[in-house]
Image (cartoon, rainbow, N blue to C red):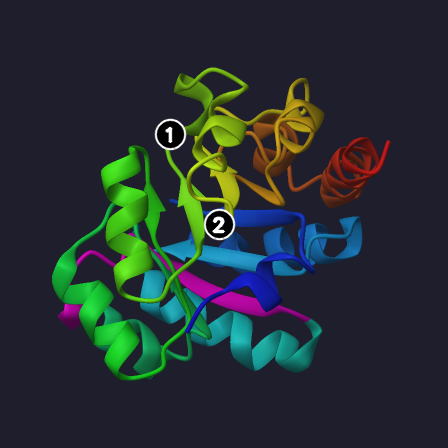
Amino acid sequence: MDAYSLVSKHPLLAILRNVPLEKTIDYAEAAVRGGAPFFEVALNSPHALEQITMLRNHFGDRCTVGAGTAITVDRCRAALDAGAQFLLTPGTPLSVLEYCASNDIMLLPGVLTPVDVATCLEFGFSTMKLFPAGSMPRHYVKDLKGPFDNTNYMAIGGVSPANIRDFFDAGCISVGLASSLMPKEAVAANDWEACVAYVSDMVARIYA
């Protein structure tokens, strides 16, 4: 199932990668309060499945929780069983594309090249995750949308508060941040109000 209806409503994806289990809810609450109720939990992080379940149970309909690094069908199944509402990949594993397409599972597949884009389109996915987006020229999305005019992209990899608006100006409909989502010092100090303000500022930059 193509993810456009979901991604187009959420310009900022909060990626939880290696967030300590005991900070999961506070970290996510800061993102939600800051205006980013849209999550990816990286499946190659410790406690990822437990964190997905925690977020779903705590927030209910207040947020949407996805599972990233879903590079095998087994990982996809485990994430869905834990409560994930959509999946993301860093690339185009054919087994995952086929599994999600066949079972009507919402997937945001990772792409970098025109070949990747064409592969995703063959399986019915026209909304994709450009990764690593920061390594490509800013005009790259517009170049892709020349021949692939019915595609849309979320930028992940290299996005920061300083350049976040650039990706939207370049044609992306959403961005995702992991390590740069919140100040490390504030997270370490459990200064969640500072984290809320930081996320709020990024959301404001998106709409500037």
At mark 1, the secondary structure is loop
x then y, percent, for residue 145: 49, 37
**Amino acid type, residue under disc 2 in the picture:** Thr
Specify few, some or many for label 1: CA neighbours under 10 Å numbering under 14, 14-19, or 20 or more.
some
Percent position of residue 74, x then y: 14, 71
Q: Residue at x 71, y 27 (%)?
A: 165
Q: Which residue is drawn at 54% across and 29% down?
A: 142
Q: Which of marks 1 and 2 is in front?
A: 2
- Label 1 sits on residue: 132
- Depth check: 197 or 207 in front? 207
What label sits on residue 151 in the rendered view? 2
Q: Does residue 69 belong to the magenta stretch?
A: yes
User: In this rendering, is residue 134 above or below 5?
Assistant: above
> Judging from the image, what secondary structure is the residue with disc 2 in?
loop
Looking at numbered disc 1 in the image, what kind of residue is underneath it?
Answer: Pro
Residue numbers of the magenta segment: 63-75
Q: Is residue 145 magenta?
A: no
Answer left or right for 124 relative to 15. Answer: left
